[in-house]
Amino acid sequence: MKAFYCHHFVLPLPDGHSFPMAKYARLHERIAAVAPALGIELHEPPAATDADLQRAHAAHYVQAMSDGSADPTLMRRIGFPWSAAMVERSRRSSGGTMMALRTALEGDSVAVNLAGGTHHAGHDRGGGYCVFNDAVVAARYVQSLGLAQRLLIVDLDVHQGNGTAELCAGDDSLFAFSMHSARNYPAVKPESDLDVALPDGTGDAEYLDALARHLPEAIARARADAVIYLAGADPYAGDRLGHLSLSKAGLAERDRQVFAACARHGLPVAVCMAGGYAPQVEDIVDIHETTVRLAAAHWRAINGVPAG
């Protein structure tokens, strides 16, 4: 299974910043250590080009982000200080999802981006630590190559994917399914194709039951050729920015449900990591690592490859 990484394109942040940038290097370190045994190949993705980004975002927004002319208000909404390194990191993160989705569709069935999931970025703005919307950029990339006509975005980050909802609105070829905390960022939640808003404190049993009911609905309505799965670590009970209460075991079962549904319907799937803000970065990395391990197990099962 191919996994794409961009942790070495570091987003420079001031001391004390709340975004856990360190998780990406730690995740890569862990996956590299087990990659031979699990059948994982690690690859650096190309940067998304202006043309790639402009299939989802306004040309003036891409230009402003690229040359540093973005309004300070916009940068505050994103939550990062502008830098050329931030732009390159964001392009590489989008490139990782583009390549994971292309790889899955070209015969591998499953591939992973060890970053991505930046679902708060809309047509002409970013927000919530998201500069470019990698899932929609990737969806329109594979459409431009003729590899897929219809895509399903399964967003299981704890926050509603408002940017994705905006970008998919009025586009019947993209179906956005978001299952998230009802009382959480963003304050204004534009309507996705299918939104499932969960009350504070939702735990494993209630969450998994809701997913078991609504994921088949999303698949049936989307009639998609492939899935982009945002496997957020932030529904975890210990997350600082979430209001749900899933255990690590519950999050692993969530991933199994998604991969099992993709297998039943013969849907290629690209996986990206999305959010995670637990006080201990190792908890975030544990959750993401389990997602990658389960994706690799899904890939081995589909392709008849034994572990080890």
Image (cartoon, helix red, strand yellow):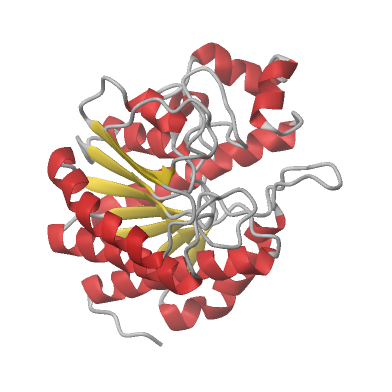
**In which quadrant will I find the C terminus?**
bottom left
Report how many numbered discs are placed on residues in the image.
0
Q: Is 38 positioned to the left or the right of 86 in the image?
A: left
**In which quadrant will I find the N terminus?**
bottom left
Q: Report if residue 191 is visible in the image.
A: yes
Residue 144: image quadrant is top left
Decide: is 250 above or below 216: below
Please state the horizontal and vertical placement of residue 302, each as a whole percent of the image: 22, 71
Residue 138: image quadrant is top left
Residue at image x 57%, y 16%?
Answer: 61
Relative depth, front residue between 240 and 264: 240
Relative depth, front residue between 145 and 257: 257
Residue at image x 28%, y 55%?
Answer: 210
Q: Report if residue 225 is visible in the image.
A: no
Can you name the residue that lies furthest to the bottom here? 308
Can you name the residue that lies furthest to the right here? 15
Decide: is 107 above or below 289: above
Please state the horizontal and vertical placement of residue 115, each as a whole percent of the image: 54, 51
Please state the horizontal and vertical placement of residue 190, each as a whole percent of the image: 40, 25
Residue at image x 53%, y 32%?
Answer: 186
Q: Is 280 positioned to the left or the right of 213 in the image?
A: right
Please state the horizontal and vertical placement of residue 234, each as a whole percent of the image: 54, 54
